[in-house]
Image (cartoon, rainbow, N blue to C red):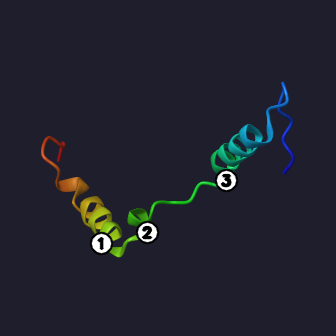
Amino acid sequence: MEFVIQPEPDPDEREAVELALERLLKPQQVPPAYESRWRDQGITENLDCEDQAPGRDQ
């Protein structure tokens, strides 16, 4: 991807700006913890117990 930067920075500054923009514009990846089976089981367990939560009308 080509970036237009004004005023034109010196080569070292341009490289730093391009690197920062590439990191910011890179597609976001899900953190590894979000893909764990342990987390999925905890969410499922909590969803199964929702209707038993305190304060809910029966």
Q: Are the residues flagged by discs 2 and 3 in contact, CB closer than 8 Å?
A: no
Q: Nearer the viewer, residue 26 or 19?
A: 19
Give the quadrant of residue 45.
bottom left
Residue at the image point whose x is 17% and y is 48% from the top: 58
Residue under label 2: 35
Q: Nearer the viewer, residue 6 or 23?
A: 6
Residue under label 1: 38
Q: Nearer the viewer, residue 15 or 34?
A: 15
Residue under label 3: 26
Residue at the top extreme of this rendering: 7
At label 1, the amino acid type is Trp
Q: Are the residues flagged by discs 1 and 2 in contact, CB closer than 8 Å?
A: no
- Residue 16, placed above or below residue 37: above
Query: Residue 52 at what x, y percent from top left?
Result: 17, 55
Residue 56: give its label: none
Q: Nearer the viewer, residue 47 or 12?
A: 12
* Label 2 residue SS: helix
- Marks 1 and 2 sit apart, C-alpha to C-alpha, by 9 Å
* Label 1 residue SS: helix
Give the quadrant of residue 16.
top right
